Image (cartoon, rainbow, N blue to C red):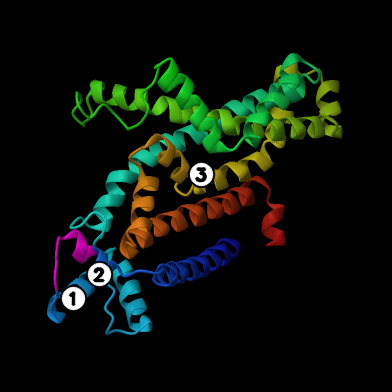
Amino acid sequence: MRYILRKLGFYLVALWAALTVNFFIPRLMPGDPVDILISKLGQHGPVTPETRRSIEALLGADSHQSLLSQYGDYLQNLAAGHLGVSVSYFPASVSSIIVATLPWTIGLIGLSTILSFLIGIGLGTVAGWKRGSWLDNVIPVTTMFQSVPYFWLALILLFLFGSTWQVFPLNGGYDVYNVEPGWSGQFLGSVVYYGTLPALTIIISSVGGWMLGMRNMMVSTLSEDYMLTAEAKGLRPGRIMRTYAARNAILPSVSGFAISLGFVVAGSIVTEAVFSYPGIGSALLQAVGSNDYALMQGIFLVITLSVLGANLLVDLLYSVIDPRTRARG
């Protein structure tokens, strides 16, 4: 229990530090979100001081308040669940934008990350178990895709399967002209169809790393003494591979997988920009272009919570898998 409380305390301090950085960094950027919102509203000519102060209060960027006062209001609003109003999507609230875009990102990037992990771990287990096989020799080819810049791979797949052969659509999250959003089979099928090419890009670019890491750990694990003991007992090869070899070899990959899940939101920016996907990464790009403090802070908050939550999950999981970490902690 002391170990868990110590870890929770550490991550609470890390969360406070991240929220503090999240508040100050956007305000160091050039430009004024109030002027941007006024221009978006089509206001031409002079703006009265009362109108400007009202907009500043709405956006949480009151120039008559010190940064410290704004910081206090920011923390208070966070505690109350108020993330502010977006400039780039005015008059929508930041919370509504995150609620609308986050499921798209989790559905695409999250599921693709899980699939690439499962495929890579499965293939890496077999490749490590059967060293020198054709699957083992394919690993350098799969890792080559990981070294290729992601946007180049995405553009190549778009050109081949979206433009040349027209197997998949070029952009979007679903057929906005012929399908109504909802839980209907038609809408879900359209979402899967539009998300297949971005998902394939993510899987192709990342499966090689999981495969190589698991293969190397399998080779290292097979040289351990307990593997010889398992073989001496006359256990079946399949059971030895799964229970003794793969179960121990997968531990480092579990840590990397949890961290990858934490960066799902942060890693969605390039994917959604290339494929014009309606996720939280596209909303972040729009917020940066509009100096939308509130929306940037809201999205950074989601990224912070996901990364810290994933790392906390890894720490707690390792304390269960390997009790020695509790003694060292």
**Callout 2–callout 1 Cβ contact below 8 Å:** yes
Spatial CA span between label 2 and label 1:
7 Å
Q: Is residue 223 visible?
A: yes
Residue at image mark 1 = 52
Q: Which mark's residue is nearer the viewer, 2 or 3?
A: 2
Q: Horizontal placement of 324 versus 160: left or right?
A: right
Above or below 150: residue 293: below
Spatial CA span between label 2 and label 3:
35 Å
Asked if the stretch drawn in magenta spans residue 235, the answer is no
Quick one: SS at disc 2?
Answer: helix
Q: Nearer the viewer, residue 59 or 103?
A: 59
Q: Earlier in the sequence, mark 2 or mark 3?
A: 2
Q: Is residue 236 visible?
A: no
Quick one: SS at disc 3?
Answer: helix
Residue at image mark 3 = 261
Q: Which residues are magenta?
A: 37-45
